[in-house]
Image (cartoon, grey):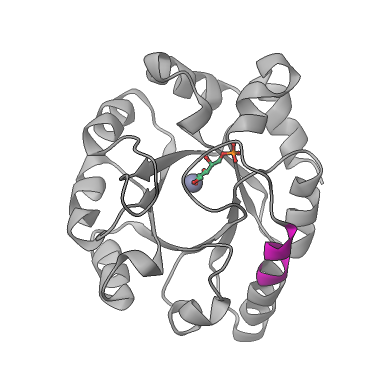
Amino acid sequence: MKKIQISPSILSADFSQLGNEIKKLEDSGADMIHVDVMDGHFVPNLTIGPPVIKALKKQSSMIFDVHLMISPVHKYIQAFSDAGADIITIHPEATENLESSIIKIKSLNKKAGVSLNPETNVDVITDYLEKIDLVLIMSVNPGFGGQKFMPKVLDKIKKLKKIQEKENYDFDIEIDGGINFENSKQAIQAGANILVSGTTIFKSNNGDIKKNIELLRSK
Ligand code: DX5
Ligand code: ZN
């Protein structure tokens, strides 16, 4: 079984202190940093782009897990790779040709992730599971932090896990949106091995990030 990894979303961090916030996450045992990139078009919210990632990457040796919620995404893959993204995750709906976007990410020696919205079926990516490094299951509709977890997506994780075992694939299964100390256990049980969390990590237990990371990791 894969090790459970925690990928805190900096969407809930203090944006005026991003460098320090990332340092804090690193010191608190985070396995990677989840960066939510939004364009105000694919999702109804705007966040940050490659220059901010580049600046943060200089200050940290952590893995940058970059979740692109932008459309059309293909022409920006190079810029996020150059900025220092280690994992580049895209949504199938945001590219004209999913396969060529995956090939592009892999050609830059980055890990390729594909994300499924709560309403998007696993079938959309079955043909690509052999090639990709990660599947990101959205447990909220993308766009905002602090939303309520949708338990129905756990079935998709179970389905993916079954395919993975049958075909002997090696992709990570990451879950993102509304993760708290209860549903984290359900997600792990279903087969997720990377948990993204913003609100729970930064706001629970009076912002005790180390404790919150430990609690999320525990089964
Ligand atoms: C939503 C983002 C998530 C989200 C996580 O579009 O992809 O990463 O902000 O934040 P919480 O844990 O607050 O749902
Ligand atoms: Zn995300």
Task: Pinpoint residue 60: horizontal percent, then vertical percent.
Answer: 38, 27
Dominant secondary structure of the magenta stretch?
helix
Q: Look at 58% across and 34% down and name the residue there.
A: 198
Q: Look at 24% across and 66% down and name the residue there.
A: 104
- Assign the N terminus to one quadrant of the image: bottom right
Residue 50, by quadrant, is top left
Q: In this view, does 88 lie to the left or right of 74?
A: right
Residue 111, by quadrant, is bottom left
Q: Which of 25 and 73 is in front in this view?
A: 73
Q: Which of 118 and 207 is in front in this view?
A: 118
Q: Nearer the viewer, residue 47 or 215?
A: 47
Task: Pinpoint residue 175: horizontal percent, then vertical percent.
Answer: 61, 54
> How many numbered circles does the render carry?
0
Give the residues in magenta.
151-156
Task: Pinpoint residue 151: horizontal percent, then vertical percent.
Answer: 74, 58
Q: Does the stretch in magenta take in 30?
A: no
Q: Which of 63 and 53 is in front in this view?
A: 53
Q: Is residue 74 left or right of residue 56?
A: left
Q: Is residue 194 left or right of residue 190?
A: left
Residue 177 lies, with reference to residue 21, above or below; the image says: below
Residue 1 lies, with reference to residue 70, above or below; the image says: below
Task: Pinpoint residue 81: horizontal percent, then vertical percent.
Answer: 25, 49
